Amino acid sequence: MASSINYDNEYIVGGSANSRLTPNFKLKEFLKPNGKIFVHRELVVGLQLLRDNFGASISIDQITPSAAFNPFRSVSTDKDRAAAITAVTC
């Protein structure tokens, strides 16, 4: 991966918009409308694997996870846990 990519633990959090994350994906493809990025590096690798296996380009609509699925928020109740699990499996 390019050196102009900023990480926070396992998450890509910034860098040059034209930096290549994988052979087929640039950082700018994952930017939010406000210009920010917060995406797990393994998600990007997984998308590249899908593209390689399909042998064609892929397109994903913007996805906004529910508030219950926030890796930086502790899950304190059974209801919160159920919501987080639903957000992951759906």
Image (cartoon, rainbow, N blue to C red):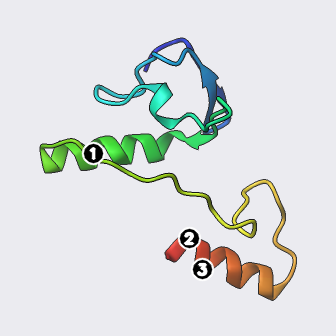
Disc 1 from disc 3: Cα separation: 25 Å
Q: Which of the 4 quarters of the picture holds residue 80?
A: bottom right
The reply to whether discs 2 and 3 touch (Cβ–Cβ < 8 Å) is yes
Give the left or right position of residue 84, taking residue 86 as reference: right
Q: Residue at 55% of width from left, 14% of height from top? A: 16
Q: Earlier in the sequence, mark 2 or mark 1?
A: 1
Q: Nearer the viewer, mark 1 or mark 3?
A: 3
Q: Earlier in the sequence, mark 1 or mark 3?
A: 1
Q: Residue furthest bottom?
A: 78
Looking at numbered disc 2 in the image, what kind of residue is underneath it?
Val
- Crowd rating for badge 1 (residues with CA inside 10 Å; few <14, some 14–19, many 20+): few
Q: Position of residue 85 (x, y in %)?
A: 62, 77
Disc 2 from disc 3: Cα separation: 5 Å
Q: Residue at 61% of width from left, 38% of height from top? A: 32
Circle 3 is placed at which residue position? 86
Q: Residue at 27% of width from left, 45% of height from top? A: 49
Circle 1 is placed at which residue position? 49
Q: Which of the 4 quarters of the picture holds residue 26?
A: top left
